[in-house]
Image: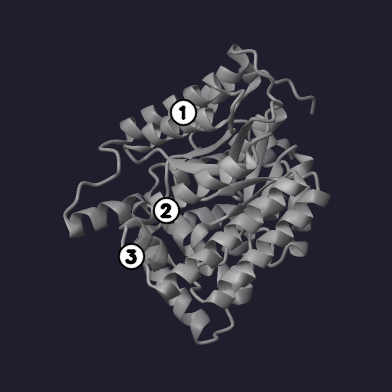
């Protein structure tokens, strides 16, 4: 398909483009999977049961691999993701390789994760279909260590050495990306460890974003203070003469954040309403585009209105849809109607592709399933699009 760069041709209901890479069998599997995810009771009960079955060694990995894992993950290794990467590439969508092993807290596991991410950098340098690398800071250091730093508590000598190692891991990844010319996203996490992550990200941007945008920090706009953070970081980047990398998302931990704020009796960092989140998100898009010569924008969103807004703004401002400072991003297995229709219209689009051994990636998949049940309308939207495409194909036969 010829890339037009014309959002008037964008039709997020075009399921032929959205599901072009899926066979009838794949579509049927996706239908039943989203039907299952839509059942909140099933997710709440099924998650601990599946975890239990995996932990005691029941032979259910094959079932998981062919259902939820296949929908949302690229493979068990970088090599195993090649087929999924190529399939996305056929639709002009690039890949963000995301090593999604979570919940491991040993120095050995942190070193292993760091080495794995460095391997994604090597692979990205050789494969033009990889547009970004990514890491989650708590994959490289203990959550409680980040929390202690956020509370401005003094670290013991052992903890100081421990954090030095965290810094070295983060720096080694950012340095490797800088040398390879590969962009890297630093994921956002819970509010009570985010200040430390922001400080690290700012330092890495100041170090490696002098000539171009390499390092991106993540701004969760469901927090009431993050639009201000984005603007403050840009002002700092201006004074220190570096490019700001800004991945803007709504956020992934809303219910946990509100529950913790209530439990510990402090004001919730979460916006009072979804309207407030949407307003700040769209303002973040406009602010970033206002300063696109000095900001790299990655709009991570499954929201059709925000995607349409960004596409419209790009065209109305006479920005090239292929401008290297603007990317749309969605998760693998979700919102294909956004990803592939945007790509078909000529925009830069990337998919987060989680990968890793089935059992090790399950905490990520459980979290993703629970998030889906709490995002109003997301699962029903996926289902309606799948049903529409199934009907279209049936009528064509």
Residue that badge 1 annotates: 235
Cα distance between the residues tagged 3 and 2: 14 Å
Cα distance between the residues tagged 3 and 1: 30 Å
Q: Residue furthest right?
A: 126
Residue that badge 2 annotates: 196
Position of 268 relative to 66 (above/below): above
What x and y, as percent, mark residue 112? 63, 71
Secondary structure under the numbered disc 1 in the rendered image: helix
Residue that badge 3 annotates: 154
What x and y, as percent, mark residue 88? 73, 45
Secondary structure under the numbered disc 2 in the rendered image: helix
What x and y, as percent, mark residue 46? 42, 70
Badge 3 crowding class, 10 Å Cα cut-off, few under 14, some 14 to 19, many 20 or more, is few
Q: Earlier in the sequence, mark 1 or mark 2?
A: 2
Q: Residue furthest bottom?
A: 56
Q: Nearer the viewer, mark 3 or mark 1?
A: 3
Q: Earlier in the sequence, mark 3 or mark 1?
A: 3
Position of 356 relative to 106 (above/below): above
Of residues 319 and 14, the one drawn nearer to the viewer in this rendering: 319
In percent of the image, x 43 and y 71: which residue is there?
Answer: 159
Badge 1 crowding class, 10 Å Cα cut-off, few under 14, some 14 to 19, many 20 or more, is few
Determine whether label 1 and label 2 are within 8 Å by CB: no
Disc assigned to residue 6: none
């Amino acid at each position: 398909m010829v890339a037009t760069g014309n959002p008037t041709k964008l039709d997020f209901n075009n399921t032929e483009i959205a599901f072009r890479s899926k066979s009838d069998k794949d579509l049927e599997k996706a239908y039943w999977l989203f039907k299952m995810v839509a059942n909140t009771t099933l997710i709440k009960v099924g998650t601990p049961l599946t975890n239990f079955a995996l932990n005691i060694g029941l032979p259910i990995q094959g079932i998981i691999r062919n259902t939820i894992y296949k929908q949302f993950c690229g493979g068990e290794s970088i090599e195993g993701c090649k087929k999924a990467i190529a399939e996305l590439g056929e639709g002009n969508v690039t890949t963000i390789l995301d090593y999604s092993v979570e919940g491991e807290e040993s120095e050995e596991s942190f070193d292993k994760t760091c080495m794995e991410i460095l391997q994604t950098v090597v692979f990205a340098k050789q494969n033009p279909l990889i547009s970004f690398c990514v890491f989650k800071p708590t994959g490289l250091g203990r959550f409680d260590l980040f929390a202690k730093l956020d509370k401005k508590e003094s670290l013991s000598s052992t903890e100081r050495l421990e954090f030095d190692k965290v810094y070295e891991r983060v720096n080694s990844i950012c340095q490797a990306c800088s040398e390879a010319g590969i962009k890297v996203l630093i994921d956002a996490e819970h509010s009570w460890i985010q200040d430390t992550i922001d400080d690290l990200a700012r330092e890495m941007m100041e170090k490696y974003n002098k000539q171009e945008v390499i390092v991106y920090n993540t701004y969760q706009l469901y927090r009431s203070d993050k639009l201000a953070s984005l603007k403050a970081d840009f002002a700092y980047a201006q004074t220190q003469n570096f490019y700001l990398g800004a991945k803007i998302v709504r956020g992934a931990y809303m219910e946990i954040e509100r529950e913790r704020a209530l439990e510990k009796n402090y004001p919730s960092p979460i916006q009072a309403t979804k309207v407030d989140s949407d307003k700040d998100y769209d303002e973040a898009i406009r602010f970033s585009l206002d300063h696109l010569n000095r900001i790299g924008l990655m709009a991570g969103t499954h929201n059709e209105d925000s995607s349409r807004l960004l596409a419209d703004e790009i065209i109305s401002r006479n920005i090239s849809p292929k401008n290297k400072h603007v990317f749309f991003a969605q998760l693998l297995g979700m919102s294909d109607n956004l990803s592939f229709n945007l790509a078909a219209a000529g925009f830069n689009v990337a998919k987060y592709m989680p990968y890793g051994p089935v059992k090790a990636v399950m905490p990520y998949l459980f979290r993703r399933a629970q998030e889906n049940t709490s995002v109003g309308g997301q699962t029903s939207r996926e289902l309606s699009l799948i049903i529409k495409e199934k009907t279209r194909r049936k009528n064509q036969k």
